[in-house]
Amino acid sequence: MKSKQITRKETVSSIREFLITALIKAAGYSAILFVGMIFLFLLLESFPALREVELSNLLSSRWYPIEDYYGVLPLIGGTLIITIGATLIALPFGVGTAIYLSEIAPRWLRETLKPLVEVLGGLPSVVLGFLGMLILSPYLRIWLDIPTGLSAFAGAILLGGIAIPTVVTVAEDALDAVPKSYRDASLAIGATEWQTIWRVTLPAARSGVLTAVMLGIGRAIGETMTVMMVTGNAPILPTGLKDLFSPVRTMTATIAAEMGEVANSSTHYHVLFLIGIILFLISLAVNVAASAVVFRQKKSQERILS
Amino acid sequence: MTMKLSARQHKQRLGFSLLTLMTFLTVIPIIGVVIYIVYLGFPAINLEFLTGFPREGMREGGILPAIIGTFYLTLGTAIFAVPLGIGSAIYLSEYAPDNRATQLIRIAIINLAGIPSVVYGLFGLGLFVLFLGFGTSILAGSLTLSIMTLPVIISTTEEALRAVPQAFRTVSMSLGATKWQTIRKIVLPQALPGILTGVILGLERAAGETAPILFTVAAFFLPSLPNSPLDATMALPYHLYVISTQVPGMPIKIQYGTALVLLVFVLSMNLIATTIRSRARAKRQW
């Protein structure tokens, strides 16, 4: 009698165990499902655009959907010039801050500054865009003596700021992971701390730092609200460095600004999804590349250790 | 020799000063931004602003519908993203074999984290609003935000689970507990502070995002509060966007007031998360 009870209890609990394991496994695989679904939906909704709009139109430099001009080059150019500008800011400041926090700052200062940088990462992009409109761009207009401060330059500065927390956090982790013995050995043979940082620590952490920069760039490419609010939104193809100081419009801002006003399943609607899939593929490429760097690093470490 | 040494030290001093300068040039604007918004937004804050409806084309009155809307969206995101995210993290930390399928899951999570927020908006519009017929609604917006939040919750939760020493699991199983009993009674409680931190940080991001809710839930202006998950709603980040770009002659005080309320909403979540994390680190005995 007693043993029978136990078996029943055990059966119930093993069914439960089986169900829960199945649920957990399903949750585990959900990420693949979501990426697949996102790709599928973008593909389905953007495919008609390729049928309805001529390729020469899509690859032209005129974006004027009201008259059926769907040239995406100005939008890609706008994203490119702002991303380059943002990288030029986020790379030195992000990596510099990471080196300072990891290698130079005293412990108490590091513990104070790191959460502050994380706060920057948590600021909603719409708040940064709002301040960019009200404070940054009027000053830029006066200082640089340009017709409007709402320009690629304003976007690049703010996007640089948005990318910095990502760069700092990931790069600092990478520097922190360099074994202390590396630094000790370098200092023991007479190198200064500065030489140790540049010739030993930074090279040892280079793949992590590279990943940090790539993830920061990925963050900048995908940013929407800030660029929409501060770049002036003029779809003009930038052709040189001077265009950094004129209004531009990015791919993300175009989707955000125009999707609310188009009719569902119109040509314009499908072209906006096409821009979406371009953004999706860019972020895919950046992230796969970033994780490939980390992966290769792990492999080479394993080789050294074995 | 002494000459050379001093040149090297000189270089080091110069380099260190430069890096210090760069760090402070990064950090000071952050503090500046927060102080500036508090300074200019605080005069707008009063009972009417926090509990009233917008009036006179949003140029007067309060922002209650936007506050309530953001609260509902955050709650809705939590309902979907928290169980799914924690389940996924449990799978990766406790069950997943080290094989190609698991590697694929990890790549998928990394990619989810990198997809631009406006692309999530497109996806939400295509799947939830149009294909599944939810319309522009809190349901569609919450689901869109959930998928966006998922990678943050999964990676922080997995990290918290992995930090629980293996010995805890071995002891529990050797006492006859099943794997799930071990996870539920031993691993999850030990990892709880880390999981909470991750969940709040993920929800913080959802609360502050604008692009994913643009075409899935956000309304320009609504005269009443939402009654069901299938209603559209106003939301704080979208409201700030609207009153700073779409409404001419908007009083600057209300703009900064709205920015301040959004900032307090988001930063207090950040503060709670980091406090939980540092308390747990201080108390941890393993």
Image (cartoon, coloured by chain):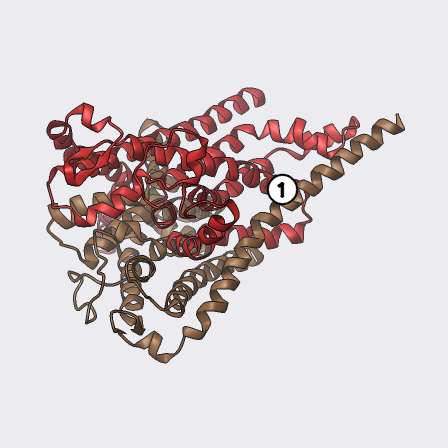
- Closest to the observer, A301 or B38: B38
Name the image quarter holding the C terminus of chain A.
top right
Residue for point 46% across, 49% down: A141
Residue for point 20% across, 50% down: A260
Identify the chain drawn in red: A
Side of A170 relative to B186 (left or right): right
From the top left corner, tell me how far across and down residue A241 is, in percent. 45, 31
- Closest to the observer, A68 or A164: A68
Q: Quadrant of residue B91?
A: top left
Residue for point 15% across, 28% down: A50
- Closest to the observer, B219 or A292: B219
Residue farthest toward the bottom in the current orientation of the protein = B47
Residue farthest toward the right in the current orientation of the protein = B2
- Report in which chain the residue with disc 1 lies: A
From the top left corner, tell me how far across and down residue B276 is, in percent. 49, 60
Residue corresponding to mark 1: A102
From the top left corner, tell me how far across and down residue A271 is, in percent. 18, 35
**B257 is higher (above) or lower (below) than B197:** below
Side of A127 relative to A298 (left or right): left
From the top left corner, tell me how far across and down residue B95 is, in percent. 35, 39
Identify the chain drawn in brown: B
Q: In the image, what residue type sits under mark 1?
A: Ser
Name the image quarter holding the N terminus of chain A.
bottom left
Residue for point 60% across, 55% down: A112
Side of A87 relative to A254 (left or right): right
**B225 is higher (above) or lower (below) than B120:** below
**A78 is higher (above) or lower (below) than B65:** above
For residue A21, say whether it is visible.
Answer: no
- Label 1 Cα neighbours within 10 Å, binned few <14 / some 14-19 / many ≥20: many
